[in-house]
């Protein structure tokens, strides 16, 4: 069911998002580089979450397209910079050469900078929202993606390479590195729908749990997944001595933690006065995905 | 006189801007890296222009501090990324080691990303402005700094290394690479002061001229300047075969072009119904500076 939902949005959202870059007067190579990484799209998890929350709250998912595009651009910039030789030095992502392998390091850095900056412009240009909503979105997004959010997570992750973390410390890394943007995808839908602060808080808690669940599942897939499906060598995290939920808590322990996060997310959904079937499906998808 | 004006703002503005980073919960090394490059401040040209336009329009310069800090953060991020090994590979800037020489490439990339992202948050948090003003500022800033503005200029500049440009093409590079942010510094003051579109257009034209004048003077100083004052070897652009106003138009030709831009900026100031003494002084400073 969720796959159907994802498919129903993928094509139109991708076309919309690419159009936001294609229509601009951007130097050719830079534009190609930005479009390349945007199009090597994975699951579009963050946009899908945003759409699902919007529809749960009774709004048309299309009302979230501009914000979701901004969000996906920021997610994509973070992957481009993350893959750079000075950072993770990855040659492949999702089975395709990374941006700097195709366009060179300089253009890759600038494509990342360009996507990050353009994201804020896209929210400004969204005619379907009030000024106050746009400002709230920009304030939240700049906090989630910035030096107290995602960028902090990146630094914490790098620092963690030198030492063994506790489970709590690993959780802290993920809450920043990936959690902040996933939380934004939920909070953004709440801002667009104009819900109460109380409901917004509940939804943010839901986002925290599924964000952590997503990371735990990632670590489990690194051990149990199939190479063809996950797009990288199985066991590569273990070999690199990375801090993972599996290395810190054993495989069985990681599966228990995954169950706990998914259960906690369900408990929150149960008390929300809306039909949460779609959000339940997302939580289940995160738990059961094979890639 | 202008030096006095610059001095009167430098200390309080610097303290204000540093405080915006210091107060945040940012991982230590990242925070130090961001503060390092912010504190290796040069002339603070863009903030000074913003303050001068505000005061010309009858407002207190302090009303522009948040926007000027955002602007300076974005300018600083662009210098950090620009200096990276994959880009210009510079070891020194303003006589001090570049960010990646002190903190390593990974942190330098992330410090740049952090400053860029945080800039937008700072505008959101400015309590002295209306929502509409903040959104206008963010829309302008993201356009000026993004893939159709400053980032485009960076790409055009890189592409220019492979070929000889015409004077018009060189102008195009500079209008993007440095012109867009200088134009923003003037436009931002106009938005904060709430001036008419017509006056805003005039001021933007003024900014375009002094922005180009600034670049022409840079190229002249590369030939005529004193090493101690300009902080790099005299003649280094020439040696590197760079496209400069001097290499394309001769030294005498560049001086004529500089005069033309300064004169054009004066003509605009003459028709503005305000006391433009301070803005005149800025134009003169740009023309006569020795560093």
Image (cartoon, coloured by chain):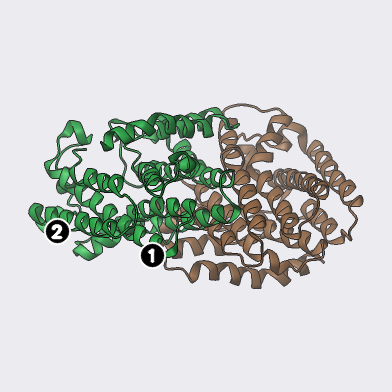
Chain colours: A green, B brown
Left or right of B137, for residue A16? left
Task: Label 2, secondary structure: give it.
Answer: helix
Left or right of A113, for residue A79? left
Q: Position of residue B261 (x, y in %)?
A: 82, 43
Label 2 neighbourhood size at 10 Å, few (<14), some (14-19), many (20+)?
some
Residue A193 to residue A5: above or below: below
Q: Nearer the viewer, mark 2 or mark 1?
A: 2
Residue A77 visible at all: yes
Quick check: do tags 2 and 1 share a chain?
Answer: no
Location of residue B27 by image quarter:
bottom left
Task: Label 1, secondary structure: give it.
Answer: loop
Q: Position of residue A72 (x, y in %)?
A: 42, 42
Image quadrant where one finds the N terminus of chain A? top left
Instruction: Check residue B27 in the rendering and tell me which mark sits there, or answer none.
Output: 1
Observer-nearest of A139 and A272: A272
Observer-nearest of A124 and A21: A124
Observer-nearest of A153 and A216: A216
Instruction: Check residue A248 in the rendering and tell me which mark sits there, or answer none.
Output: 2
């Amino acid at each position: 069911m969720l796959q159907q939902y994802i498919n129903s949005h993928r094509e139109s959202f991708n076309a919309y998002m690419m159009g936001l870059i294609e229509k601009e007067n951007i130097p050719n190579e830079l534009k190609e580089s930005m479009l390349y990484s945007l199009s090597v799209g994975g699951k579009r998890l963050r946009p899908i979450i945003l759409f699902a929350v919007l529809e749960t709250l009774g709004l048309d998912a299309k009302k979230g397209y501009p914000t979701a595009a901004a969000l996906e651009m920021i997610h994509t910039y973070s992957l481009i910079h993350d893959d750079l030789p000075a950072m993770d030095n990855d040659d492949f992502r999702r089975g395709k050469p990374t941006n700097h392998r195709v366009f060179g390091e300089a253009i890759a850095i600038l494509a990342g900078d360009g996507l990050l900056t353009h994201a804020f412009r896209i929210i400004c240009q969204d005619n379907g929202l009030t000024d106050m909503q746009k400002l709230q979105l920009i304030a939240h997004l700049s906090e989630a993606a910035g030096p107290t959010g995602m960028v902090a997570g990146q630094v914490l992750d790098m620092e963690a390479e030198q030492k063994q973390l506790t489970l709590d410390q690993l959780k802290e890394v993920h809450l920043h590195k990936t959690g902040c943007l996933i939380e934004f995808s939920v909070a953004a839908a709440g801002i667009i729908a104009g819900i109460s602060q109380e409901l917004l808080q509940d939804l943010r808690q839901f986002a925290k749990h599924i964000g952590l669940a997503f990371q735990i599942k990632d670590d489990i897939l690194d051990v149990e997944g199939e190479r063809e499906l996950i797009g990288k060598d199985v066991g590569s995290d273990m070999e690199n001595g990375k801090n993972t939920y599996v290395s810190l808590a054993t495989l069985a322990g990681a599966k228990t933690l995954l169950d706990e996060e998914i259960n906690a997310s369900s408990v929150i959904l149960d008390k929300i006065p809306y039909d949460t079937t779609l959000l339940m499906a997302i939580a289940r998808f995160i738990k059961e995905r094979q890639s």
